[in-house]
C-alpha cells in the first residue's frame, strides 16, 4: 500500500519537467518580435514576427504603442485589424504606424511573451542630418567636418534628443555608421578598386606612358575646346560603369587639360556629366541590370501590365530627358567656348593665369602636383605603356561582366553580372600589366614601381575618407527613414499628368539628401510605379495608348536620381569625379550646380511635363536641346583664350 505514494513521489519531478517543457513550448510559439529602434511618428514601419506556424495563435494579440490588435491564424496566414501582414516561411512582416514612442508587444492571455521597444521622432527631424551636412559643406567649404557633423546629429536623433543622446550619437558615429559603411562588401570593393586604379595611374605616370598619351592627344587637342571635346568623347566611350568611367577619364585627361589651361572644375564637370548619365541610358551597363531587376520585382505585383522588365526599361529611355540633355549640354558648352556662373570664373582664372585650381582649393596637394609620379625625362615616353593597362582595365571589366553573368543574351548576362567582382579583377590585372611593362622594359626598377604604385594609391586617400563618410550619412538617412518621410509628404492626391514630374522631383530630393542615386531608385521604384499605375486606373488611363505616363514615371525615377546626385555635395559619384579630376570637391559642386539646375529645369518644363500630356518624347528632346543652346548663348560669356 505504501508503494503507490512512493511511486507517485518518484514521478513528481518528471511531471514537473514535462509541465515546464510544455510551458516552454507554449512560450516558444512566438520566437521573436522586432521593430526599428527609431521610427517616425505617423509614418508606417515594418515589424517582423518569427513564429512557429505549426502551433495555434488564436489566444494572442499584438500591441503597438499601446494600441491592441487582435489577430488570428488560419492556414499559415496571420491577420490583424488595421495591420497589413505579409507571410514568408516562419516570418510575418507587419506594417504599422505609431503616434508615440513605445514598444511592439505580443501578448497571450494578457501576459507579454515578446516585445521590441522603439522611439518615435517627428518626421521633419529625419531630413535635418543631410541638410546640416550640405549646409556646412557649402558655407565653410569643408566637406569632411560637414559630413561628420551630419552623421553625428543623425546618430543622436536615432538615440534620443538629450545630452546623453548626443554623447551616444558621437560614439555611434564611428562604431556603428562609419564601421557599418566600411563593412559592406560592395562599398569595400569600390574602395579597393579605387585604390588599385590610383596605383595603376601612379605607375603609368611614372613610367612615362601617361605623358606619351598626353603628347599624342595634344597633337589634336591643342586648344581648350578640343581638350574638352576629347574628355567628353572618352566619357561616352566608357559607358558600361560610372565608377570606371569617372576614374579612368579623370585620371587620364587631367594632364592634358592642365596643359591646355582647362580648370579642374571644368574637367570634373565633364567627367561627372558623362558618367552616370551615360551609364543609366546605355542598353548594356551595370546600372541597367540593377534597374531592370527592380522593375521586374515591381511588375510581379502588377500583373495587369503586359511588358517585360527590360522592355519597360527600353520604352522609358526616350523619356530620360535629364540624362540625355545633360550629355548634350556638355558638348554644347565645349563647342561654344562659353561658360556662366562660378564656372566662368574658374575657366577665366585657368586661362589667364594658368592656375587650374583655386588658391584655397582643398585637395591632396602632393598628389595633385604628382611629385612622386613624375616620369624620368631621360627615359622613353611610350604611349603603349599607358594604353595597354587602361585597355586591360576596360576589357577586363567587360570580360568580368560576361563571366560573372548568366542568361541567353548579352543583355541578360550583363544585367545579372557581378560588377564589383569584375571591377576588382580588371583593376588588379591592369596594375600587374603596368608593373610588368615598367620593369620588363627597364624603365623602372621593382622598387621604383612599388613606390609609384604607393604614390598613386595615396592620391585616393583623401577622397576615400569623404566617400566613406558620405556612405555613413546614407546609412543614417536609412535609419531615420528620410526617403519614406519625403514620400509621405509629397505622395498624395495626384493627377496622372502630375505623377512623372512629382516623381522626378521626389527622386532628385531623395538622391540629393542621401547622396545615392542607386539608393533613391531602390527606395522609390517599388513605391511610385504601383502608385502611378493606380492613379492611371482610377482615371481610366490604363490602356496601352496611355502608357506614356508609366514610361515617363519609370524614367523620372532614374533621371531624377541622377539629377539629385549631380547637385549633391555628398554624392559618391560627385566625390569620385572630384577625386579623379584632382579638383576641390566643394568647388566642383559650386561650379556644376548652375549647369545641373539649368539642364534639370529645361528637362522638366520642355520634356517631362509636356510628355505627360502626350507630346512625343523626341519633340521634347529637340525643344530642350534648342533651349539649352539658347541658354549658353544668352547666359554664357566667351572664356578668354591664352597664347599657346
Image: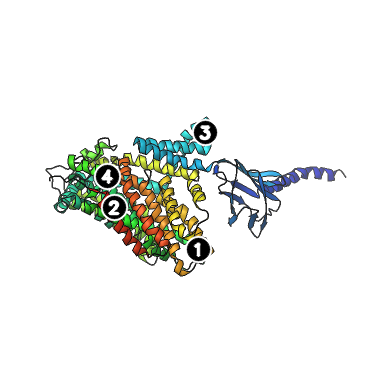
Q: What is the number of the mark on residue 631?
A: 2
Name the front one of labels 3 and 2. Answer: 2
SS category of the residue bearing label 2: helix
Q: For the point 35% across and 45% down, which residue is it?
A: 191
Mark 1 vs mark 2: which is more N-terminal? 1
The quadrant the N terminus occupies is: top right
Q: Position of residue 396 (x, y in %)?
A: 30, 56
Name the front one of labels 4 and 3. Answer: 4
Q: Position of residue 51 (x, y in %)?
A: 62, 51
| Image height of 304 relative to 251, above or below | below
The residue wearing badge 3 is 165
Mark 3 vs mark 1: which is more N-terminal? 3
**Mark 3, other Cα within 10 Å: few <14 / some 14–19 / many ≥20:** some
The residue wearing badge 1 is 536
Q: What is the number of the mark on residue 343?
A: 4
Residue closer to the observer: 126 or 124: 124
Amino acid at each position: 500500500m505504501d508503494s503507490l505514494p512512493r511511486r507517485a513521489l518518484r514521478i513528481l519531478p518528471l511531471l514537473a519537467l514535462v509541465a515546464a517543457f510544455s510551458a516552454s513550448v507554449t512560450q516558444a510559439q512566438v520566437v521573436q518580435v522586432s521593430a526599428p529602434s527609431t521610427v517616425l511618428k505617423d509614418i508606417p514601419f515594418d515589424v517582423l514576427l518569427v513564429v512557429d506556424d505549426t502551433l495555434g495563435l488564436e489566444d494572442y494579440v499584438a500591441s503597438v504603442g499601446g494600441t491592441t490588435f487582435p489577430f488570428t491564424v488560419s492556414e499559415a496566414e496571420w491577420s490583424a485589424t488595421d495591420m497589413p501582414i505579409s507571410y514568408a516561411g516562419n516570418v510575418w512582416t507587419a506594417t504599422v504606424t505609431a503616434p508615440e514612442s513605445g514598444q511592439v508587444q505580443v501578448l497571450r492571455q494578457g501576459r507579454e511573451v515578446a516585445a521590441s521597444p522603439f522611439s518615435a521622432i517627428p518626421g521633419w527631424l529625419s531630413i535635418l542630418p543631410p541638410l546640416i551636412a550640405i549646409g556646412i559643406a557649402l558655407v565653410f567649404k569643408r566637406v569632411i567636418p560637414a559630413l561628420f557633423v551630419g552623421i553625428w546629429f543623425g546618430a543622436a536623433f536615432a538615440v534620443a534628443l538629450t545630452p546623453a543622446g548626443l554623447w551616444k550619437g558621437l560614439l555611434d558615429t564611428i562604431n556603428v555608421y562609419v564601421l557599418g559603411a566600411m563593412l559592406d562588401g560592395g562599398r569595400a570593393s569600390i574602395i579597393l578598386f579605387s585604390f588599385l586604379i590610383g596605383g595603376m595611374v601612379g605607375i603609368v605616370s611614372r613610367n612615362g606612358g601617361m605623358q606619351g598619351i598626353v603628347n599624342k592627344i595634344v597633337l589634336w587637342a591643342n586648344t581648350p575646346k578640343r581638350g574638352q571635346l576629347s574628355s567628353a568623347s572618352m566619357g561616352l566611350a566608357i559607358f558600361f560603369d560610372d565608377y570606371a568611367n569617372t576614374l579612368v577619364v579623370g585620371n587620364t585627361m587631367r594632364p592634358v587639360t592642365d596643359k591646355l589651361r582647362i580648370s579642374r572644375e571644368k574637367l570634373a564637370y565633364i567627367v561627372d556629366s558623362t558618367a552616370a548619365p551615360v551609364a543609366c541610358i546605355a542598353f548594356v551597363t551595370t546600372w541597367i541590370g540593377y534597374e531592370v531587376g527592380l522593375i521586374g520585382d515591381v511588375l510581379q505585383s502588377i500583373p495587369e501590365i503586359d511588358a517585360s522588365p527590360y522592355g519597360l526599361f527600353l520604352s522609358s529611355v526616350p523619356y530620360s530627358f535629364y540624362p540625355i540633355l545633360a550629355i548634350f549640354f556638355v558638348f554644347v558648352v565645349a563647342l561654344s567656348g562659353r561658360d556662366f556662373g562660378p564656372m566662368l570664373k574658374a575657366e577665366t582664372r585657368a586661362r589667364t593665369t594658368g592656375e587650374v585650381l583655386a588658391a584655397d582649393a582643398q585637395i591632396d596637394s602632393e598628389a595633385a602636383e604628382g611629385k612622386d609620379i613624375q616620369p624620368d625625362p631621360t627615359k622613353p615616353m611610350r604611349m603603349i605603356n599607358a594604353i595597354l593597362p587602361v585597355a586591360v582595365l576596360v576589357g577586363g571589366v567587360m570580360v568580368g561582366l560576361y563571366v560573372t553573368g548568366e542568361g541567353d543574351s548579352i543583355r541578360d548576362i550583363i544585367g545579372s553580372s557581378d560588377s564589383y567582382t569584375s571591377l576588382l579583377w580588371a583593376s588588379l590585372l591592369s596594375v600587374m600589366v603596368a608593373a610588368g611593362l615598367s620593369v620588363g622594359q627597364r624603365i623602372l626598377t621593382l622598387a621604383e614601381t612599388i613606390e609609384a604604385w604607393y604614390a598613386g594609391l595615396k592620391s585616393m586617400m583623401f577622397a576615400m575618407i569623404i566617400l566613406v563618410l558620405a556612405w555613413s550619412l546614407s546609412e543614417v538617412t536609412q535609419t531615420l527613414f528620410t526617403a519614406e518621410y519625403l514620400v509621405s509628404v509629397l505622395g498624395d492626391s495626384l493627377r496622372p499628368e502630375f505623377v512623372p514630374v512629382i516623381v522626378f522631383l521626389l527622386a532628385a530630393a531623395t538622391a540629393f539628401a542621401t547622396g545615392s542615386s542607386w539608393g533613391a531608385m531602390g527606395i522609390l521604384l517599388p513605391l511610385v510605379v504601383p502608385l502611378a499605375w493606380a492613379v492611371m486606373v482610377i482615371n481610366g488611363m490604363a490602356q496601352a495608348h496611355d502608357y506614356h505616363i508609366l514610361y515617363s514615371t519609370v524614367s523620372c525615377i532614374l533621371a531624377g536620381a541622377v539629377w539629385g546626385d549631380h547637385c549633391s555635395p555628398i554624392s559618391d559619384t560627385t566625390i569620385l569625379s572630384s577625386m579623379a579630376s584632382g579638383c576641390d570637391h566643394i568647388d566642383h559642386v559650386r561650379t556644376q550646380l548652375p549647369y545641373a539646375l539649368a539642364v534639370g529645369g529645361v528637362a522638366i518644363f520642355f520634356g517631362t511635363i509636356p510628355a505627360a500630356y502626350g507630346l512625343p518624347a523626341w519633340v521634347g528632346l529637340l525643344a530642350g536641346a534648342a533651349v539649352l543652346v539658347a541658354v549658353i548663348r544668352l547666359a554664357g560669356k566667351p572664356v578668354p583664350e591664352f597664347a599657346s
